Structures are given as C-alpha cells and as structure tokens.
Image: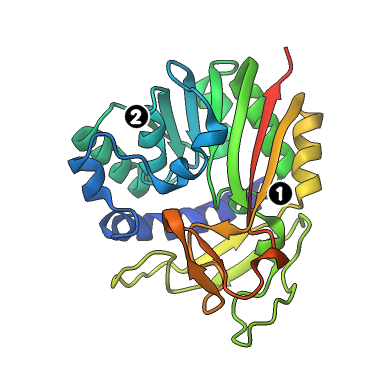
C-alpha cells in the first residue's frame, strides 16, 4: 500500500507542478492585486470571515496550501502562518508571493501525512485546510490523526471543503440533470482522471494530466475527527463553490462563488467545519 500511495502522490505532484505557474499567472488567483494591495484577503478566506473569528497571534498551519494566497490572507489577518504542500513548483510561487507582497510566511515541502514529523507535534493553535484538499488524500482517518497530532490541546481545525455530494455528481453532463456518478464513500482504489485543463482561466497547455483522487463521505470525515480526539464545534453546508464545478449549470454570484442556476437548493456544494482538540 505504501508503494502504491507514493506512486499516486508522485503522479499528483507532477500535475500540480505543471499547473502552478499557470495558476499564479491566472486572473482567477489575482496575484498582482495581492502585491499591489497589502490589505487584500482572498475571496475563499473572506467567504468564511464571520465563522473564522479572531486569529491574531495564533500559530497556524495551512495544509495543502498550493500557491499560498489563502495562507497569506490568514497571515494578513494576524496569524503566524506556515504553509505546507507537496508541490515544489507551487511552493516556489508561494514563497515569491510572500516575499513580494508580505507578510512573511514559512512554506515547507512535504505531503500531508508527513506534516507532524516535519513540523512537530502539538505546535499549532490552528490548522486550516481549503477547498479541493481532501480529495487528494486516500485515507480520511489518517488525515484526521495528522490534524490531531499537529494541534496543541484546545487548538482547532478550520476547513471549508467541497461537499462529498458535489464530488459524486457527474460534472460532464450537458442536459442539466444531476446524476450521482462517482463514489460518495471512501474507497481504497482511487478515481483516475486524465484532464488536460485546469480550474482557472489560462491559455497554458500541460504535459501531466493524470490524477488519482478519492471522495470521503461527510459522516466518514466527522467520525474520523471524533475518533482522533477532536470535538465537532461547527458544520455549515453551503449552496455555492468558488469555481464552476458543474460547467454549464451554474451562475457566478458574489465573492467569486458559483451556484446552481436551476433550483440551487437541490445540492450542497461546500461545507465549513470546525473541530477542537480535546484538552
């Protein structure tokens, strides 16, 4: 299993390395505005500001931070942030952004499950993970144990993630019908995709298009956190997502979010979850 996971992660790393420069250059990430405006906060972080609360002075780590725009946003809100990602090219972009835009953020290269060994255990008050993160991980229970190891007693996890129901819907139908096509529950074998594109506007072409991904049911996620010694303190489902997840079926609304055009109450698209580590 270890050899297979390393192979899966290697394939996914190549995909992210290939796309990181294009993401940093895309107007969707708007890196130039971060450099021009020292008070700018990403739309992803801004969406959850009412739920995030005061993070001034807390020691935080952003897992799967990609090119660092959300990490930098959390630092601008006063947290002492570290970003972690497995993609060398993504971290190059993140470090460049931090150097040019500020404030300083430490970025570390490692895969999520290695985070406690690389960063230390019990060192953080706050773990943040953003949308499109869990689907790259084969085991949600191992992820939850990683979170618990990173947090100091009383520390909290804050995450907004794509809803597993959204990940299960066929995103290639053109008739507007919502059809459950992909697994909802975690499975040992990954879903394998070969997609030459990406989720931001870009004219770039890519050489590494194969990915391995997993879904994890909402109950599986909550149960994994509880079993890892965490206490659930918030779970809010949303009818929007910050990219056009179902092409041709969505309308863009405020804060760069997308919502189903037809009866958006039919499908949860994302959720915000908070959990605290028991003392």
User: If the image is split into quadrants, where does the C terminus sit?
Assistant: top right
Query: According to the image, what is the colour scheme of the structure?
Result: rainbow
Residue 246 visible within the image: yes
Residue 113 visible within the image: no
Q: Position of residue 88 (x, y in %)?
A: 37, 45
Classify 10 Å Cα crowding around label 2: few (below 14), some (14-19), many (20 and above).
many
Q: Number of numbered discs present?
A: 2
Q: Position of residue 151 (x, y in %)?
A: 61, 21
Toward the viewer: 14 or 276? 276
Q: Position of residue 113 (x, y in %)?
A: 60, 36
- Up/down of 71 relative to 130, above or below: above
Disc 1 on helix, strand or loop? loop
In primary-sequence order, the first of circles 1 and 2 is 1
- Up/down of 276 relative to 242, above or below: above
- Up/down of 47 relative to 147, above or below: below
In the figure, is residue 23 to the left or right of 220? left
Point 37% across, 60% down: residue: 19
Point 81% across, 46% down: residue: 219
């Amino acid at each position: 299993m270890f050899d297979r996971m390393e192979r899966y992660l290697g394939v996914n790393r190549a995909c992210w390395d290939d796309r990181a420069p294009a993401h940093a250059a895309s107007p969707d990430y708007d890196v130039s505005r971060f450099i021009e405006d020292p008070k700018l906060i990403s739309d992803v972080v801004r969406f959850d500001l009412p739920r995030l609360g005061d993070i001034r002075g807390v020691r935080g780590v952003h897992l799967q931070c990609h090119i660092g725009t959300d990490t930098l946003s959390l630092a601008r809100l006063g947290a002492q942030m570290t970003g972690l990602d497995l993609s060398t090219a993504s971290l190059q972009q993140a470090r460049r952004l931090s150097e040019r835009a500020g404030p300083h953020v430490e970025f570390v290269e490692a895969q999520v499950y290695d985070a406690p060994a690389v960063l230390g255990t019990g060192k953080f008050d706050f773990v943040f993970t953003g949308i499109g993160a869990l689907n790259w991980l084969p085991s949600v229970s191992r992820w939850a144990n990683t979170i618990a190891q990173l947090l100091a007693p009383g520390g909290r996890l804050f995450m907004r993630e794509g809803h597993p129901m959204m990940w299960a819907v066929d995103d290639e139908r053109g008739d507007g019908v919502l059809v459950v096509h992909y697994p909802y529950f975690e499975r040992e074998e990954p879903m394998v995709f070969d997609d030459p594109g990406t989720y931001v506007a870009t004219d770039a072409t890519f050489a590494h298009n194969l990915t391995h991904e997993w879904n994890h049911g909402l109950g599986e996620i909550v149960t994994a956190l509880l079993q890892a010694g965490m206490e659930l303190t918030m779970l809010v489902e949303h009818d929007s997502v910050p990219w056009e997840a179902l092409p041709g079926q969505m309308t863009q609304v405020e804060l760069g979010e997308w919502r189903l055009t037809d009866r958006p109450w039919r499908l949860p698209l994302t959720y915000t979850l908070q959990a605290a580590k028991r003392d």
